Amino acid sequence: MSISKLEVAKNDALSAQEEKEFFKENGYIGPFSIYPPELVDSMWKKVRFQLLNKKNAIYGDNKMNYDRHLDIKILSEIVSHPDIVRRVQNLLGQNLLCWRTEWFPKYPGDEATAWHQAESFVAFEGDSKLVPTEPHDGSWELTVWFAFTEATLETGCLKVIPKTHRTWFFDEKRNVPFDPASTSGFYGYDFEKLKIDPDWKPDESQALHVPMQAGQVLMFTSRCLHGSEPNISKDRLRMGLAIRYVPTDVMVYPNHTDKFTHFGEVFPLENYAAVLVGGQDSFGHNRLTMPLTGGD
């Protein structure tokens, strides 16, 4: 089952209350159109070269290229785009942080990404990257997946299983050894090892595939089962930017005072700051910065 272009048009016309109710029921909303595809094509031509220049990247010469919204203005404008922020605020509250951005390329021949869940982003390594300090009625984290290129069934668009955010099928707090030689799983990690019931299998008949044009976004709680199919095209790249948001009461990297590790790399945190994209911070848990201004 796939989302059609007509359904995307309907999504863009939903009221804030309708979006909130749909998200609470299903664990995702969208896709929504943020930029026209032709504009995103020109944005991507600039960004792909800027990504090669890591002089101002907070993690230095890091192959994962996390958090480049902190030094590339186009990416900063995307994470703080009023149409994105407004919808995220509707779901998480007015006081809002962007705490991370991540790249999800899928090149021709790349394998599928298995079904998985997350919330505190332990990410196979035992320590929560996110810890809320206030009670929340529902989700307290949100991923916004921004399509920098068209994402189709052939190139491995996102897929979700609606309503699965209500049940944990994976134990994200387990430690899983990193195996760079692994050809299955996710960049050297195996989601299968996080299953609570090793014999459990998702109901593929309920999977919803989400094709997107460049410039569209899908918003979902990472507790909602999500993944993607392989890129079976001959010559088309699928490039997505995952933008992670939390309310300001959430402590970011509370167990990582100076660095964290992931995918076999070290990420020093001395230059890290979460971006205040909406409202204000009355908690003071995190080092903050504002969206970039001026320049390219």
Image (tube, rainbow, N blue to C red):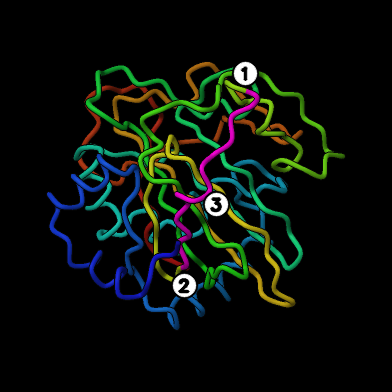
Residue 255's spot in the image, x, y percent? 53, 16
Q: CA distance from mark 1 to mark 3?
A: 28 Å
Closer to viewer: mark 2 or mark 1: 1
Magenta part of the protein: which range? 198-211
Q: Is residue 73 visible?
A: no
Closer to viewer: mark 1 or mark 3: 1
For mark 1, what is the residue? 174
At label 1, which amino acid type do we have?
Arg
Q: Residue at x 39, y 23 (%)?
A: 251
Q: CA distance from mark 3 to mark 2?
A: 19 Å
Image height of 31 relative to 132, above or below: below
Q: CA distance from mark 2 to mark 1?
A: 35 Å
Q: Going by the image, does 11 lie left or right of 47?
A: left
Q: Going by the image, does 86 lie left or right of 202?
A: left
Q: Earlier in the sequence, mark 1 or mark 3?
A: 3
Label 2, residues with CA under 10 Å away: few <14, some 14-19, many ≥20? many
Q: Earlier in the sequence, mark 2 or mark 1?
A: 1
Give the total number of marks visible in the rendering.
3
Q: Residue at x 31, y 32 (%)?
A: 139
Label 1, residues with CA under 10 Å away: few <14, some 14-19, many ≥20? some
Q: Residue at x 59, y 29 (%)?
A: 200
For mark 2, what is the residue? 214
Q: Assess whether mark 1 and mark 2 are in contact (beta carbons under 8 angstroms).
A: no
Q: Going by the image, does 93 lie left or right of 144?
A: left
Image height of 286 relative to 81, above or below: above
Query: Is residue 209 on the magenta stretch?
Result: yes
Secondary structure at numbered mark 2 = loop
At label 3, which amino acid type do we have?
Arg
Q: Nearer the viewer, residue 174 or 96?
A: 174
For mark 3, what is the residue? 68
Q: Is residue 241 visible?
A: yes
Q: Residue at x 65, y 33 (%)?
A: 191
